Image (spheres, grey):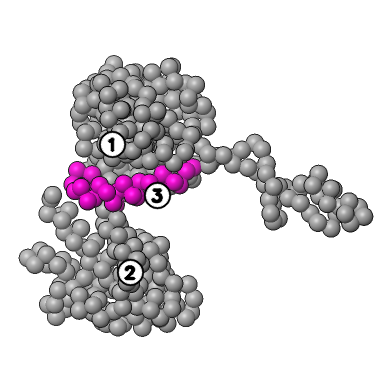
Amino acid sequence: MPEDAVERERVAVGVSAGLLALAARMRAAGVECGPGHLVTAHRALAAVEPDRRRARVALRASLCASRDDIEVFERAFEELFGDRPIAPIDPGKGEPQAAGGTPSGALGTDEEEEEGEEPDGEEAHRVGEWSAIEVLREKSFRAYTPQDRELARDELRRLAAELPWRPSPRSRRAPARAPRLDLRRTMHAAVRHGGDPAELRWRRRGRRPRRLVFVCDVSGSMAPFAEIGLEYVHAVLRAGAPAEAFCFGTRLTRITLELRAGDVAGAFAAAEAKAVDRAGGTRIGAAIAALNREYRHRLGRGAVVVILSDGWDRGEPGLLAVEMAHLRRTSHAVLWLDPHLAEPAYEPLTRGMRESLPSVRAAFPGDRLSGLIELTEATRGLA
């Protein structure tokens, strides 16, 4: 793993340790400060410069919901971190250094963290596991250990449960005031009051799950990323979503039934047996053409199509652009997961990406959990 990536992970672990100690002290004082608050705090710290005053304001805004919470936060922050600035990593020792040279986390010293009250029992395990997953979210799939895969699998199941919805033409009853008055039920209720509509009844527009269509590149260049991407698809199918799954190398293969049945190992074995062109060349244009022609009845205008590929296309020039434009017109939206998107110097230089981008609504990193999280949020936010 590159040295800069190792240093970033060390900083992330130090920040997590400091935040856990701060949250423990606030919980001990009666403030609600759970994993969701800590996720917000991490994101707030990432959005500001590494300055103590800015970090303090960002944490206070993330962790406090009332004036009383602010008083508890200020006291806990001073007890843990005092007036020491946020120190940079010391590459020689591999840990952040505090002002006095004592090893510390990015926000405070290890000794101070030991003095703070830590969550115990099941809560301690849950918060510790959350911290590991938070670090794992920005880690490339290439660097995953077997333990990382297990944690990631739990996170994938959680994401799969957050299914996207679409508006339904049918309305449904609403328990409280809603945009639409239900005249029929209101008049029926008025009969009990001598014709006086004293009890109003309401309806709201219904919703139903939005169809998802996954198209995964299983060619040789996608080997480090396709397996975890397919695990995400497997989790979505097992969650009961109205979804379809396809894979392609030199040709398109439908693997919906194989991924929907059984556990991950059994589903992958069945899918591999069916996809005989895996780990070979890539013909994205031909695969999208087959999707548009042979499986158009499984798409529909309400479907969101998710393509996982690095864009390397050895097929007929120009075919992919035509087929992607057709796919964009016949589906609700086309999203793309590119394993190289998170690289600092990334440019869409592959022919496949250049031809596809005009038809893609949004693209996300396909080499890490954070990209799958962004994808899940995007599918839920589509109108």
Quadrant hosting residue 345:
top left
The x, y position of residue 313, in whole percent, is 26, 24
**Number of residues whose C-alpha sits closer than 10 Å to that of mark 2, classed few (under 14), some (14–19) or many (20 or more):** few
- Mark 3: which amino acid? Arg
Q: Which residue is mark 3?
A: 158
Q: Secondary structure at mark 3?
A: helix
- Whichever of labels 1 and 3 marks the residue nearer the N terminus, that label is 3
Left or right position of 324 against 203 = left
Q: Is residue 301 above or below residue 80?
A: above
Choose mark 1 or mark 3, whichever is in front. 1
Q: Residue at x 27, y 24 (%)?
A: 273
Label 2–label 1 contact, CB within 8 A = no
The residue range painted magenta reads: 137-164
Q: What label does residue 121 carry, if any?
A: 2
- Residue 94 versus residue 50: which sits nearer the camera? 94
- Mark 1: which amino acid? Ala
State whether residue 353 appears in this view.
no
**Number of residues whose C-alpha sits closer than 10 Å to that of mark 1, classed few (under 14), some (14–19) or many (20 or more):** few
Q: Which residue is mark 1?
A: 265
- Whichever of labels 3 and 2 marks the residue nearer the N terminus, that label is 2
The x, y position of residue 88, in whole percent, is 18, 68
Q: Residue at x 84, y 48 (%)?
A: 188
- Whichever of labels 2 and 1 marks the residue nearer the N terminus, that label is 2
Q: Is residue 100 above or below residue 19?
A: below
Quadrant hosting residue 294:
top left
Left or right position of 139 against 165 = left
Quadrant hosting residue 259:
top left
Q: Secondary structure at mark 2?
A: helix
C-alpha distance separating marks 3 and 2: 22 Å
Left or right position of 341 against 180 = left
**Number of residues whose C-alpha sits closer than 10 Å to that of mark 3, classed few (under 14), some (14–19) or many (20 or more):** some
Label 1–label 3 contact, CB within 8 A = no
